[in-house]
C-alpha cells in the first residue's frame, strides 16, 4: 500500500495523533507481550526495526510531516527541561541541517516522537 493510501486509511480510522499510532502498533501484539515490547523499544529504539510502520524512510518522513508540530513541541519542552537542545543529543543528527529539512533528520525525529510517546504510554500503564 502506498504511503498516501496509508495516511488516508489512518485518517479514516480516526488516527490523528501519535499516541493513537503507538497504541495501534502496540495492540497488534498480544496483550501479555506489550510491556516487554515497550521496554525493548525504550532500550533499542526504532532504529532496531521493531516498529514496522517506521522502518523505511518514506514512511518515517511521512510520519514526521504528519506530526511535526507535536514532535517540535516535545523537543522544545524537553530542551527547556534539560537546558540544551534535544536535537544535539540524537545519535546520527546532522548538525548541518539544523532546521531538519533533510530526510535523515526527519527520520530521526519521527523515531524520537514515536519513542517518546511509547515511553509515556509505558509510564501510564505500568508506572515504572
Image: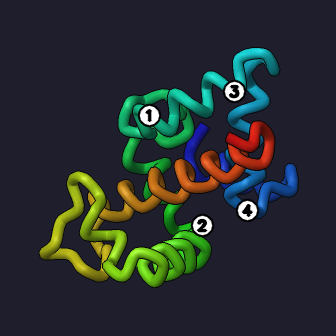
Q: Which residue is mark 2?
A: 66
Taking the spot 62% from the left edge, 22% from the top edge, the residue there is 36
The label nearer to you, 4 versus 2, is 4
Query: On screen, 33 above or below 7?
Result: above
For the residues marked 4 and 3, what is the alpha-carbon distance in whole angstroms?
A: 21 Å
Q: Residues within 10 Å of mark 2 (few under 14, many from 20)?
A: some
Measured as percent of width and height from the top left, residue 90 is found at 29, 58
The label nearer to you, 4 versus 3, is 3
Which element type, helix, strand or loop, lies under badge 3?
helix
For the residues marked 2 and 3, what is the alpha-carbon distance in whole angstroms?
A: 27 Å
Residue 105 placement, left or right of 15: left
For the residues marked 4 and 2, what is the alpha-carbon distance in whole angstroms?
A: 9 Å
Residue 71 placement, left or right of 7: left
Q: Which residue is mark 4?
A: 17
Report which quarter residue 8 is drawn in.
Answer: bottom right
Q: Are marks 4 and 2 in contact (CB under 8 Å)?
A: no
Query: On screen, 9 above or below 87?
Result: above
Q: Which mark is residue 35?
A: 3
Which element type, helix, strand or loop, lies under badge 4?
loop
The label nearer to you, 1 versus 4, is 1
Closer-to-camera residue (84/91): 84
Amino acid at each position: 500500500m502506498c504511503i498516501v493510501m496509508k495516511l488516508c486509511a489512518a485518517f479514516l480510522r480516526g488516527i490523528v495523533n501519535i499516541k493513537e499510532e503507538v497504541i495501534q502498533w502496540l495492540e497488534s501484539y498480544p496483550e501479555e507481550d506489550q510491556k516487554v515490547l515497550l521496554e525493548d523499544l525504550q532500550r533499542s529504539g526504532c532504529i532496531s526495526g521493531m516498529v514496522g510502520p517506521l522502518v523505511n524512510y518514506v514512511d518515517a518522513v511521512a510520519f514526521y510531516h504528519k506530526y511535526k508540530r507535536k514532535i517540535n513541541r516535545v523537543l522544545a519542552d524537553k530542551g527547556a527541561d534539560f537546558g540544551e537542545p534535544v536535537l544535539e543529543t540524537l545519535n546520527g543528527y546532522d548538525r548541518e541541517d539544523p532546521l531538519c529539512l533533510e530526510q535523515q533528520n526527519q527520520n530521526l525525529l519521527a523515531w524520537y516522537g514515536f519513542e517518546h510517546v511509547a515511553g509515556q504510554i509505558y509510564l501510564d500503564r505500568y508506572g515504572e
